[in-house]
């Protein structure tokens, strides 16, 4: 079943198409053939700018969690043989501080509808009964409506397509590696999260965006690339504004 056959969603998709196509047309004198890609970049920047208050809240929550780390270690020491009690006490501690261990997921969830609409706009051959002109656009010769996996499997991945995708994926991987190194979470004593297997899983999660990007149209991948760069820069700036306790203590090392 096509969810966009539902009239309200169809109207939303058509409105998004009109806005993006109009922005692309306005940018053509400046960006030429890459006008649609530039429009996606501007939409990304607008979305992330609107989410700045969410990022600030996330940074405050991260600072609070770091401050609670000694209490969490004490709870783990006290209730390590009683997992159910440990879970209850941990959640009670978070509630008492008006925060949550899942606060960092909000920016990702807030962007999901935008990514879904971009994915659909560059996937459907027609929008509201008229041809989808966005599919005629490209970025430096790479079609905006084609995913990396589709281009490779269909044999349509030319040199331009491969170079554009290589650049985007390299950018996302570099950002993921910097994020992994700079924002490594503080370890908790005797925590299952400190096991080698779990640490590998946590490290690998930083690269999920690059994995997901190869499955979506290039336009959506451009959105993902811009947003991960924004996220890294924003987190670095907010970490300076809301430093973690160990980053401001005497003799502390570099910010993690």
Image: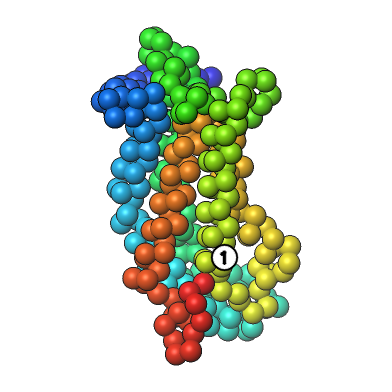
Asked whether, in this view, residue 53 is left or right of residue 63, the answer is left
> Residue at coordinates 54% horizontally, 47% vertically from top-left?
172
Q: In this view, does 254 lie above or below 57?
A: below
Using the image as rendered, state which of residue 40 and residue 54 is in the foreground: 40
Q: Which colour scheme is used?
A: rainbow
The picture places residue 178, in percent across and down from the top left corner, at: 54, 60
Residue 83 seen: yes
Q: How many discs appear?
A: 1
> Residue at coordinates 47% horizontally, 28% vertically from top-left?
140
Q: Mark 1 falls on what kind of element? A: helix
> Residue at coordinates 48% horizontally, 81% vertically from top-left?
246
> Residue at coordinates 57% horizontally, 34% vertically from top-left?
163
Using the image as rendered, state which of residue 1 and residue 244 is in the foreground: 244
The picture places residue 194, in percent across and down from the top left corner, at: 67, 71
- Find the residue positioned furthest to the bottom: 250
Asked whether, in this view, residue 33 is left or right of residue 2, the answer is left
Q: In the rendered image, which residue does mark 1 sit on? A: 181
The picture places residue 50, in percent across and down from the top left corner, at: 30, 48
The picture places residue 2, in percent across and down from the top left corner, at: 50, 20
Q: Is residue 209 above or below residue 55?
A: above
Number of residues whose C-alpha sits closer than 10 Å to that of mark 1, classed few (under 14), some (14–19) or many (20 or more): few
Residue 19 seen: no
Using the image as rendered, state which of residue 137 and residue 62 is in the foreground: 137
């Amino acid at each position: 079943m096509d969810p966009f056959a539902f009239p309200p969603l169809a109207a939303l998709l058509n409105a998004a198409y009109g806005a993006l196509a109009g922005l692309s047309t306005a940018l053509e004198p400046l960006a030429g053939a890459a006008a649609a890609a530039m429009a996606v970049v501007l939409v990304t920047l607008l979305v992330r700018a609107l989410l700045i208050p969410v990022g600030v809240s996330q940074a405050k929550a991260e600072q609070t969690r770091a401050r609670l780390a000694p209490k969490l270690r004490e709870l783990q020491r006290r209730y390590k043989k009683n997992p159910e009690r440990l879970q209850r006490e941990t959640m009670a501690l978070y509630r008492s501080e008006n925060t949550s261990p899942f606060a960092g997921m909000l920016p990702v969830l807030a962007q999901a509808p935008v990514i879904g609409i971009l994915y659909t706009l560059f996937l459907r051959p027609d929008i509201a009964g008229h041809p989808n002109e966005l599919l005629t656009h490209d970025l430096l010769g790479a079609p905006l409506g084609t995913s990396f996996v589709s281009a490779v499997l269909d044999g349509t991945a030319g040199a331009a397509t491969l170079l554009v995708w290589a650049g985007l994926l390299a950018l996302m991987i570099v950002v993921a590696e910097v994020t992994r190194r700079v924002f490594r979470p503080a370890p908790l004593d005797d925590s299952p999260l400190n096991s080698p297997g779990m640490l590998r899983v946590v490290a690998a999660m930083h690269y999920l965006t690059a994995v997901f990007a190869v499955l979506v149209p290039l336009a959506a991948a451009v959105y993902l690339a811009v947003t991960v760069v924004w996220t890294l820069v924003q987190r670095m700036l907010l970490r300076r504004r809301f430093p973690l306790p160990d980053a401001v203590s005497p003799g502390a090392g570099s910010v993690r």
